[in-house]
Image (tube, rainbow, N blue to C red):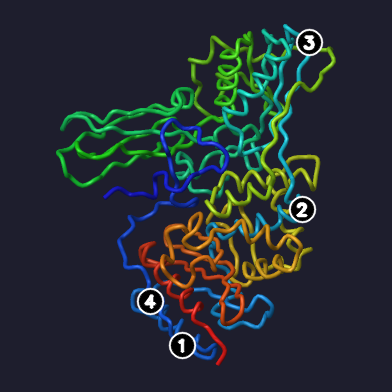
């Protein structure tokens, strides 16, 4: 059975699907995931549970023999009352996985506001039809796609532009460099570990599809984007197997090299196998894509370069930032920026959707890139100079103002992909409870996935009492599972809860089933 965690499950973007094939995402932070086993959906029973009996019922679940090596942290409390209904190691640190997004998005919503939009400006010098320079300045908008760049090109065409002497894309890697140093390197070549820079295009991801051929023949490799494909060298060792053989395809990166190794077998009668991969050099990908789009609209580009604003250096698209040089770019670019004394004016701009909608992509679909891009927006709010820690400082400042104890969590990134993140169930539940007391409460809660309705909870809690009443954020890493959110109980109170499991040797499916059982116990709470 194919491992679905390496491939596209839920839609990765709320804006536009840019791939020629439908690529979908399962979960935003899968690191070395184990194959999902099929487990029976937990049942929802109608018998009422008294609050006094809740501890015994939950302990019966987490004390099962299969969880003897697992570490649980749980806090359950009424939304309007901080007194816990259940607490287990709730003030101790756990790896929270994607539950860290609850903290990042709460801070962003408070600091930036629900109507905040990310604006990417395009400047030019010279006059139509000939521009001396055309410069697009990155602002870390994770939602930019080819469609928006085509709109910019059409605006320029409408202004009479036909030639650009020098195209400059002003980029920068934020807030850590190309890859957060606390991430596992094996995540860096997959879609959920894509680099976060200031000129993000198509979420810095590319689709790769493997097609079975005749038995014994190599699998056929097809890319969704030829520009992104040129940044990778594929060592295809995978072959087509006989009809009906088990799935065993695996794609692995090679540390420090632009190489993907494909191993395993795909049955001759199997469907095409879709993979989501990271664009290896996002800045050059943006440059070449934008130039191609301009030329498609009849605007010629004589020279093109990337200006790295974070490092105060200029590099042409054949100069990788710590990456392999791709000589195929060399004849079409120049790495010398033209000195220009002409007046610069804004010719066009691209605006993202409002922050309230971007948050839904983060919390409902667990989009790591969107979450990390928020750190740049927060970074610019607290200082004029870029710093690896500035965005995280802004998050902590915002939550401290909200009332969240700054000692109850420690951030290493904004998405939860890092195993250096630490948070207590208390920190997460406190964030949820305090956000519910602000004017932004509804926007924040609506950004979360709803049981059996949306996001990463769309296929969970089917035909149970949690349907439509549970809004929560999931989180998964190998050995880690999390669920935190709000639960409305018709005959009781609205609850806020955080359930974190660490150091487990059980499959993700087994952990999810136990967490779901706990939530379904809560739906049966009543006054006694």
Q: Residue at x 61, y 38 (%)?
A: 143
Kindly identify the residue that appears in the image at 71 percent across and 52 percent down: 108
Estimate how packed mark 1 is, as few (under 14), some (14 to 19) or many (20 or more) residues with alpha carbons within 10 Å.
Answer: few
Depicted 493 relative to depicted 506: above or below: below
Image coords of residue 175 (percent x, y) = 66, 43
Specify which label sits upstream in the sequence, 1 or 3. Answer: 1
N-terminal-most mark, 1 or 4: 1
* Relative image position of residue 27 (x, y in whole percent): 46, 52
Q: CA distance from mark 3 to mark 2?
A: 38 Å
Q: Which mark is residue 262?
A: none
10 Å neighbourhood of mark 3: few (<14), some, or many (≥20)? some
Residue 345: percent from left, percent from top: 81, 20
- Residue lying farthest to the bottom in this orientation: 528
Dot label at residue 111: 2
Query: Where does label 4 land, which residue?
Result: 68
* Alpha-carbon span between mark 2 and mark 1: 41 Å
Residue to which mark 1 is pinned: 56
Q: Nearer the viewer, mark 3 or mark 4?
A: 3
- Sequence-first tag of 3 and 2: 2
Mark 3 lies on residue: 126
**Gap between marks 4 and 2, in whole Å?**
42 Å
Mark 1 touches mark 4? (CB < 8 Å): no
Label 3 and label 4: CA atoms lie apart by 70 Å
| Quadrant housing residue 405 | bottom right
Camera-near label (4 vs 2) is 2
């Amino acid at each position: 059975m194919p491992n679905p965690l390496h491939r596209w499950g839920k839609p990765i973007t709320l804006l536009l699907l840019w791939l020629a094939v439908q690529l979908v995402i399962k979960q935003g932070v899968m690191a070395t995931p184990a194959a999902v086993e099929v487990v029976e959906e937990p049942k929802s029973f109608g018998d009422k549970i008294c609050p006094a009996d809740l501890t015994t019922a939950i302990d019966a679940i987490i004390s099962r023999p299969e969880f003897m090596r697992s570490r649980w942290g749980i806090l359950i409390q009424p939304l309007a009352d901080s007194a816990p209904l259940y607490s287990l190691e709730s003030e101790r640190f756990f790896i929270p996985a994607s539950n860290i997004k609850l903290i990042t998005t709460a801070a962003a919503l408070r600091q930036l506001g629900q109507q905040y939009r990310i604006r990417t400006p395009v400047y030019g010098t010279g006059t139509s039809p000939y521009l001396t320079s055309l410069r697009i300045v990155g602002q870390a908008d994770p939602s930019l796609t080819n469609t928006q760049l085509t709109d910019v090109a059409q605006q320029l065409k409408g202004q009479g532009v036909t030639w650009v002497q020098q195209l400059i894309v002003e980029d920068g890697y934020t807030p850590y460099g190309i890859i957060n140093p606390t991430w596992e390197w094996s995540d860096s070549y997959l879609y959920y570990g894509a680099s976060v820079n200031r000129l993000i295009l198509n979420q810095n991801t590319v689709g790769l599809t493997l097609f079975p051929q005749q038995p014994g023949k190599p699998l056929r490799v097809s890319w969704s984007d030829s520009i992104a494909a040129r940044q990778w060298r594929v060592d295809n060792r995978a072959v087509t197997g006989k009809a009906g053989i088990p799935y065993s395809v695996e794609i692995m990166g090679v540390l420090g090299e632009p190489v993907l190794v494909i191993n395993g077998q795909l049955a001759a009668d199997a469907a095409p196998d879709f993979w989501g991969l990271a664009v290896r050099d996002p800045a050059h990908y943006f440059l070449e894509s934008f130039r191609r789009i301009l030329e498609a609209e009849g605007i010629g580009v004589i020279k093109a370069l990337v200006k790295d604003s974070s490092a105060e250096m200029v590099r042409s698209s054949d100069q990788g930032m710590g990456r392999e040089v791709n000589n195929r770019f060399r004849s079409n670019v120049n790495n010398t920026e033209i000195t220009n004394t002409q007046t610069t004016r804004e010719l066009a701009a691209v605006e993202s959707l409002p922050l309230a909608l971007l948050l839904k992509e983060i919390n409902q679909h667990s989009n790591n890139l969107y979450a990390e891009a928020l750190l740049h927006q927060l970074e610019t709010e607290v200082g004029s100079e870029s710093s690896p820690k500035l965005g995280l400082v802004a998050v902590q400042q915002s939550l401290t103002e909200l009332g969240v104890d700054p000692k109850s969590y420690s951030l290493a990134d904004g998405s939860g992909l890092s195993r250096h993140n630490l948070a207590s169930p208390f920190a997460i539940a406190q964030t949820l409870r305090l956000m519910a007391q602000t004017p932004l409460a509804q926007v924040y809660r609506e950004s979360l996935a709803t049981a059996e309705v949306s996001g990463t909870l769309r296929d969970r809690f089917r035909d149970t009492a949690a349907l439509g009443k549970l809004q929560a954020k999931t989180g998964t890493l190998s050995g880690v599972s999390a669920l935190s959110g709000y639960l409305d109980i018709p005959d009781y109170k609205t609850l806020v809860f955080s359930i974190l499991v660490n150091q487990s040797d059980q499959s993700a499916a087994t952990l999810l089933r136990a967490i779901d059982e706990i939530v379904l116990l809560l739906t049966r709470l009543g006054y006694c």
